[in-house]
Amino acid sequence: TDETNREDTSLDTIVPVDPNVPYDMKDIIERVVDNGYFFEVMPNFAKNIIIGFARLAGRSVGIVANQPAYLAGVLDIDASDKASRFIRFCDCFNIPLITFEDVPGFLPGYTQENNGIIRHGAKIVYAFAEATVPKLTVITRKAYGGAYIVMNSKQTGADVNFAYPSAEIAVMGADGAINILFRKADEATKAKELEAYKEKFATPYQAAELGYIDEIIYPRQTRKRLIQALEMTENKMQTNPPKKHGNMPL
């Protein structure tokens, strides 16, 4: 009963202008899905990633989303396991996957490294790459480094990728990059290069030029564009190579 072309102008102001200010990704999800109903799964485990079910134009979809309101939405071992299992569940039962992405990277630290963050993070990219259901992505803000790649990017086989004008698709944040690239420069040079870096990389336009983003959309158009993309990919026919199984990083 929810209008497929419905636009919610409040979506335009949910993502803060300051990239370091948190927001609740569920505020976006609930405004996009049918009748504002999102059935979250495992809400109290690995809160930095959100998984759950919803409907778009009556179709069941599985949603995987970073949660900037908790640990800035980084990927850690628990979040990687939680997401990859859900992705494989949706693929098992032919449920299309929608990813809402705002990820600054993988969580650093001795404990994460010692317990195999790379192996666990690889589970997500394996699960997304192996899934043959329709796969859509919306980049709301940060999409940095390896975490951008694993979160259903074009490079790993996503079908349709959207980005908000506030999206930043880069190897790392502007401040960190400039402090590495121009560590010996004076403050005036750093400030000048910082603005140039932001203008070039802290936008989705270069990624769109390279074909990594299909369309840059206004946030209020999210519901309409996702429904159109689901209709376009409804009859997607993709099969994995005829092998018994792949070698998942367990």
Image (cartoon, helix red, strand yellow):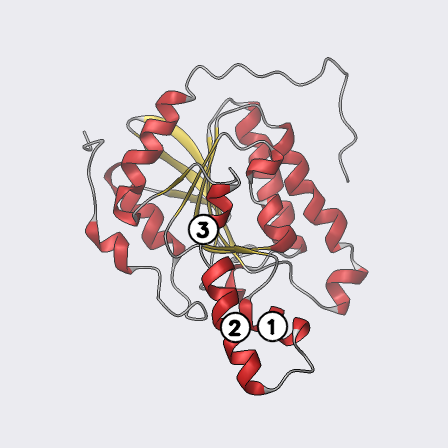
Q: In the rendered image, is residue 33 in sight? A: no
Q: Residues within 10 Å of mark 1 (few under 14, many from 20)?
A: many
Q: Quadrant of the N terminus?
A: top left
**95 or 172: nearer the viewer:** 172
Mark 3 or mark 2: name the one nearer the start of the chain.
2
Q: Residue at x 65, y 76 (%)?
A: 182
Query: From what the image shows, is residue 145 above or below residue 2?
Result: below
**236 or 69: nearer the viewer:** 236
Q: Residues within 10 Å of mark 2 (few under 14, many from 20)?
A: some
> CA–CA distance between discs 1 and 2?
6 Å
Residue 154 horizontal side relative to residue 222, left or right:
right
- The disc at residue 178 is 1
Q: Residue at x 30, y 49 (%)?
A: 219
Q: For the residue marked with disc 1, what is the amino acid?
A: Ile
**125 or 81: nearer the viewer:** 125
Q: For the residue marked with disc 2, what is the amino acid?
A: Leu
Mark 1 or mark 2: name the one nearer the start of the chain.
1
Q: For the residue marked with disc 3, what is the amino acid?
A: Pro
Identify the residue position indicated by label 2 in the image.
194
| Marks 1,2: beta carbons within 8 A | yes
- The disc at residue 204 is 3
Residue 127, quarter of picture: top right
At which x and y percent is residue 60? 38, 28
**Element carrying mark 3:** loop
Mark 3 or mark 1: name the one nearer the start of the chain.
1
> CA–CA distance between discs 3 and 1?
19 Å
**Element carrying mark 1:** helix
At which x and y percent is residue 161? 46, 38
